Image: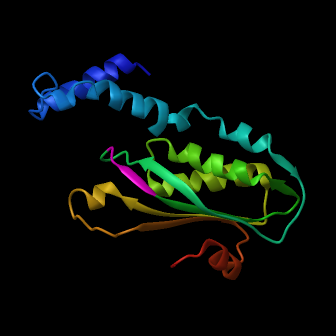
Amino acid sequence: MDREQAARAIEAFLRALDQDPERDPSLAGTGMRVAAAFADDLLSGYRVDVDAIVTQNVFPGRSELVVVRDLSVTTICPHHLLPSTGLATVAFAPDERLVGVGAVGRVVDAFSRRLALQEEIGEHVVATLEKHLEPRWIGCRLLLTHSCMTARGERTHGARVETVALRGKVDEGAATLALGVGR
């Protein structure tokens, strides 16, 4: 990433909105701060090898059900470049392989820290874990509040968007219970 070019672009964007960083002291350095926030944090998932996270943390084992709840999610909407925040739940029925639960959280975070639609995040998480674990079934539920809905447009404060990605021979009762759909 070219931070200098990104900072100049942010400053040009502000000037196009009649908010000149040279006239308003509160905007001094904003271009560089925004570029750093996107490079170092908000888009850091592009630098993460999610396959390596999983393969380095897989071990033999079986369980009826594994559920990792309340994983913090922050992502940037590719349509408006505004944040969405909330929680993810990942549930799977292992067949012969387990994975460290911290790795599950890192996979969710890596896919969230990209310019991504909510639906894509869940699908990517499920596809990656399914590929390496080959569980009987797997699901990822995301429950997010979108700034593009609350801070602009409809201003639907309190609205949350819920998506569920499922793969495998899903036991609907177990998936519903594990993922907490509709809660």
Q: Residue furthest right?
A: 60
On screen, residue 5 versus residue 100, left or right, reads left
On screen, residue 160 versus residue 54, left or right, reads left
Quarter of the figure with the N terminus? top left
Quadrant in the rendering for residue 55: top right
**Against 15, is 132 above or below?**
below
Start-end of magenta stretch: 81-85
Q: Residue furthest front?
A: 25
Q: Position of residue 87 (x, y in %)?
A: 52, 61
Q: Residue furthest bottom?
A: 173
**Against 40, is 99 above or below?**
below
> Residue at 68% across / 52% down in the picture?
104
Dominant SS of magenta comes to strand
> Residue at 48% across / 41% down in the picture?
114
Residue 53 located within the stretch drawn in magenta: no
Q: Position of residue 78 (x, y in %)?
A: 37, 45
**Looking at the image, what colour scheme do you see?**
rainbow
Along the viewing direction, whichever of 27 and 85 lies nearer the viewer: 27
